[in-house]
Image: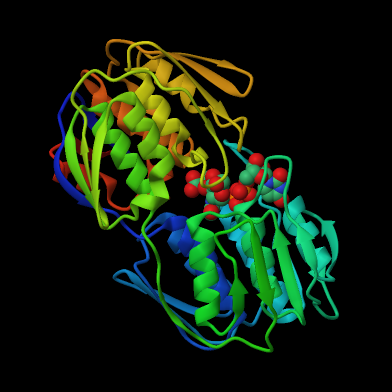
Amino acid sequence: MEKLVIEGGQKLRGEISVSGSKNATLPVLAATLLTDKPCVIHNVPRLRDTLTMIKLLRSLGKSAVLEGDKVIVSKPTTSYVADYKLVSTMRGSFCVFGPLLAKFRQASVSLPGGCVIGIRPVDLHIKGVMGLGAKIHVESGYVHAKANKLKGTYIYLGGTFGSSVLATANVMMAATLASGVTIIDSAACEPEVVDLGNFLNAMGAEVMGHGTPQITVRGVKSLHGAEYKIGPDRIEAGTYVLMAAATKSDITIKNLNPTHIMALLHHVQEAGVSYKQKGHTVKITSRKNLKPVSLTTYPYPGFPTDLQAQFMALMATTPGVSVITEKVFPDRFIHIAELNRMGAKIRREGYSAIIEGVKSLYGAPVMASDLRASAALVIAGLAAKGRTEIHRIYHLERGYENMDEKLRGLGAKVWKEKE
Ligand code: EPZ
């Protein structure tokens, strides 16, 4: 195993380029199961999660190879059983459920179970496919779905915590090969859902309204292969914005879509960070003392839960009191303990965290636990005085392509060492 070592207190400078979106890549790769024809997906980030999804496609009969930043998928899909070994290592693999059901009229996928950010229920996924006519039974940790035929229908997909990204993805994919029209109401509006809808249409599907709360899918007989370029990773981009803010640095972030991170840019501007956007580039300037900012996470276009931990790391060294409320994954606060080990003063109160900004954090050995919590520890380590060692960095490598190299390119003193 490896650890990430950070000598803190270093200003960042220069520019980084954002990689392709992890959370768009996973459902788009899953969608290739809907056809036996070849597909080529470009701008795919080289991440643990991408490689896990490629392994899962292979276990379902596909040939899938990552060459540089493109994945070439071919050969027929021959199995509808997604086994526990792979699905349990990555909750996102559950997005093969919809395409397998559409292709075979049956699917058996291991339940994703829980993870450190909370339980990961699939009731909305099940509600959606049952609406299309599937019969469901859950047995020994697997969800089994079977349908003589899939018929288009109206589905309200809003849950206790609002819309669901991957439930929207699964129902969209299942509906592409159903007969008739499906309307998905209270659909997730995330840019990753837009990427998926665009890819499905490139395959010959008829998806409309993706990116809005109401998506319409007119079923077709079959789908053909397609070539597609994944959009930029908005969470990676937002993470680098917060690294610049926390180290009072000026950096340029390229190859992003600034409209995808407007909630973040609004809140960091409120804190005193300035930014200039031009096309697919954003220049961040963070010098003066920042002001505390309180926020609540919501489904897109609200402030993303996937940037909550990273924003908390910024507020940890911002003088004053800020409150961060988590409305998407209410238990997503595992990073509080590790930030406090670095000298932060944060306490949890129900769905909120109260952060009393301190003058400085101090480097310490810390443990990565969840992908985005690990990113928060990197931000804290960059801002802290002294050396931080982040153990179990495979969590980080699940979602950030070459973060250590990109940070060294910005002048940070960051390197990997054997545990
Ligand atoms: C996607 O997960 C992302 N993962 C997550 O990113 C992200 O945090 C999340 O969307 C929210 O934006 C991928 O795209 C691979 P949800 P997903 O269904 O789709 C509840 C990362 O760090 N819910 O939108 O699994 C759920 O418990 C990862 O990259 C139900 O109640 O999340 C949560 O409270 C972490 N029933 C809320 O909805 C369901 O059937 C939103 O979850 C499904 C979800």
Position of 378 relative to 2 (above/below): above
Residue 186 is situated, as x and y percent measured from the top left of the image, at 69, 53
Q: Does 167 appear above or below 11?
A: below
Q: Nearer the viewer, residue 155 or 8?
A: 155
The quadrant of the image that shows the C terminus is top left
Q: Nearer the viewer, residue 391 or 53?
A: 53
**Visible residue check, residue 331:** yes
Q: Residue at x 66, y 77 (%)?
A: 176
Picture coordinates of residue 146, whole percent (x, y): 82, 72
Residue 113 shows up from this direction = no
Tell me the residue at 39%/63% (across/down): 231
Quadrant housing the N terminus = top left
Residue 297 located left or right of residue 317? right
Q: Is 359 placed left or right of 226 in the picture?
A: left
Residue placed at 80% from the left, 57% from the top? 127
**Residue 396 x/y as whole percent:** 39, 43
**In the image, residue 132 above or below residue 271:** below
User: Is 67 displayed left or right of 159 in the figure?
Assistant: left
